[in-house]
Amino acid sequence: MTHTASLRIGLFGFGTVGQGLYDVLQRTPLLRTEIARICVRDRFKQRSAPARLLTFDRDEILDDPDIDVVVELIDDPDAAFDIVSRALESGKAAVSANKRMIASRLPELLELQSRTGMPFLYEASTCGSIPIIRNLEEYYDNDLLRSVRAIVNGTTNYILTALHSPHTGGYGEALAGAQRLGFAESDPTLDVEGYDAAFKTTIIAAHAFGVVLNPSQVVRRGITAITPYDVSVARQLTCSIKLLSTVQLHGDSLSVMALPAFTPNGLHLASIQNEMNAVQLTAAFSDAQLLVGKGAGGGPTASAVLSDIAAIRHTYRYEYKKMQQPVRPTVDHGIEVSVYVRASAAILREVPFRSIEVDHRGITGSYVIGRIVLDDLHRCSAFLDPSVFIAIVHDG
Amino acid sequence: MTHTASLRIGLFGFGTVGQGLYDVLQRTPLLRTEIARICVRDRFKQRSAPARLLTFDRDEILDDPDIDVVVELIDDPDAAFDIVSRALESGKAAVSANKRMIASRLPELLELQSRTGMPFLYEASTCGSIPIIRNLEEYYDNDLLRSVRAIVNGTTNYILTALHSPHTGGYGEALAGAQRLGFAESDPTLDVEGYDAAFKTTIIAAHAFGVVLNPSQVVRRGITAITPYDVSVARQLTCSIKLLSTVQLHGDSLSVMALPAFTPNGLHLASIQNEMNAVQLTAAFSDAQLLVGKGAGGGPTASAVLSDIAAIRHTYRYEYKKMQQPVRPTVDHGIEVSVYVRASAAILREVPFRSIEVDHRGITGSYVIGRIVLDDLHRCSAFLDPSVFIAIVHDG
């Protein structure tokens, strides 16, 4: 695959992103990249691509020696892993947007890249059009990174924005609104329970700090229990509630969370509205930096995929530089955090707070804001109770 | 210069940034980068670096075959150009933060890089810690970039923020405040007259659109004429006044400006406060993206310089990919823009507006908001009159 020859893409999946990519490449012949074949599942669906490009047999792409790059844009994480691993094994570069597959199978994917020598890029998997992985790889590899805090899930941010509006009808109505506008899927579990955020947090942790985690190690909780009452308490503290992915260094140890958070309104992150994503990086010398952009949708995701394709043309690959450092942080959730827990008095009594800052019992709601060891929070029964709302309280 | 050997730096200038860089490298031995020699001018100043590193003779660095990278952090643009060109000619990589030198001598610097094959990086020259050049080079090279709008000058943004506060005492007081806090120099001309912004705009145009300009081609105007009255007019239109660098595509032609702008408060750029910098990129597929960070100061600038040094270790160089496109846009200021001009009635009469939206004559001030061809604005006598305040009115 030379610098000037046309790059031949084998595409898996032709949903919004696949179509977006196809459209982009049609409109920009200068990119010298053509989609040579598209593997789809449903034989009877109408599609905007010429029928001669379509195949229903993945081997027609994976066994084709003239295809240079496999772009995988399907949902099923196991099938996606098969496709990517077979592509790499057969000497093809691979591009994916499947955060679930990447986060869950990172050790295998690292081994595959190292053994085959083939590049595997996945910028589109995390924050869509925001070039977060590339920047963590290339630009924040020297300055001493201290934390990454990010809004990585557009669905929950859309719902949370609606819940902060004066006319909010509560979580159910906000979710229904998001579904009507296409910002939430009919089964929104992966988004609203924070799984999607945990996958992306895992990917961020790998590139920001060189730490390979299982997504289950991320302290994760969703937003389904949130009520306008919680929003009003946050507002009293001049905070907005956001679902924040946080990867933060404390000395040699690292905390990794995907949790609702009372985010001070003075922080840029608090002002990120609707389906937008944002990443705030804090480093020793460069101070806080913010990247804002669209995290999902056909155009933004296709744009990130395209950037990966162009990078492959320039023989770019992730070097996972942070993983090669002699000293790497280890995940340790023995740190103390401030947390808001809204629950019944009986449940609140069981939460093993170290110290309590606010203890509020009222007819409309009871809550405690206190300090707690993150591991203790993660293991306490309230954490598993779907009626309880829990949010980290940020110190600014 | 191999991947594992220690990198030896020859540093020119030991002001805030040079000291910041020295401190960073002292604290991070893992970077395997050492400052081998520091060339300074003043023989009698106390410095925090060991005396054995200091030299007053630039040849001691430029003729030293053991020095791999020359980092140039001095003010004088001509001396800076000499240092960088001699470094490249003698087979050394070069890093600079001198936007004035880079913007003014870009054609020569391109020729030098191409002839010597040595890399010249200058991320710190534009928006300090925000990795804008690297992202334009690497990440926004495919998606069809439409515009870059940016706050690139911390001094003027600090002054403008003060002018928007309810207790403002006007431009003079805001400038004096910025000077007291070290955000403005004792001679602030380069900043407040928009020259610094024009230099950075030139650099952005080269990397965003492959267009090499002389900084004098940028339609540039400063903020010295601004009054609280102008701010109150902007406020009525729910806008904030920002000094915006704008590089924008209109079909095949490009407009390049560094001008005060009425920026709608709904845009993120309007909310960038004090000395912060921000860059908003608009592309066909990824939509608007925003990067926010500190644009100046020892830490942020040193962090950007350090990133360049690390990139050199990884044999990175700017490829100026956009310049190699078969079709490049040409600068053409024949486009129509909306503009606010506050001046005396006599001066306003002479401004060649195409159409007028607001014509306000009052005891406290007279202004016109109208459409005008950018070239006509640039050439009209009001543009040169230091008592007149002119601002682009953004359409959102």
Image (cartoon, coloured by chain):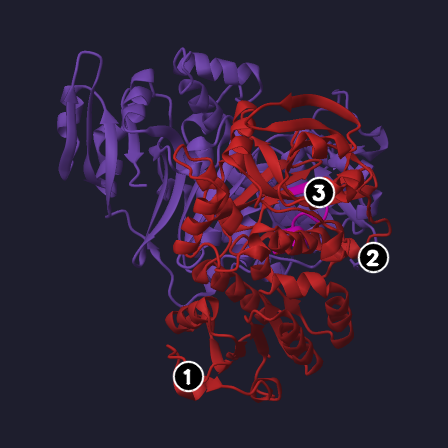
Chain colours: A purple, B red
- The part of the chain drawn in magenta is B134-148
> Mark 1 to mark 3: distance in Å?
45 Å
From the viewer's perspective, is A309 left or right of A156?
right
From the viewer's perspective, is B326 left or right of B8?
right
Q: Classify residue A76 by image quadrant.
A: top right
Is the Cβ of the residue at disc 2 closer than 8 Å to that at disc 3?
no
Badge 1 or badge 3: first in the primary sequence? 1
Q: Secondary structure at mark 1?
A: loop
Instruction: From this view, report whether residue B112 is shown above or below residue A84.
Output: below
Q: Which mark is residue A90?
A: none
The quarter in which the N terminus of chain A is drawn is: bottom right
Instruction: From this view, report whether residue B12 is shown above or below residue A281.
Output: below
Write down the residue under mark 3. Answer: B383
Residue type of the residue flagged with mark 2: Thr
In this view, the mark in front (2 or 1): 1
Q: Residue at x 27, y 30 (%)?
A: A383
Q: State whether residue B2 appears in this view.
A: no
- The chain ID associated with circle 3 is B
Write down the residue under mark 2. Answer: A4
Q: Classify residue A138 by image quadrant.
A: bottom right
Labels 2 and 1 within one chain: no
Q: Nearer the viewer, residue B49 or A305?
A: B49
Q: Position of residue B132 (x, y in %)?
A: 60, 52
Q: Which mark is residue B44?
A: 1
Residue type of the residue flagged with mark 3: Phe
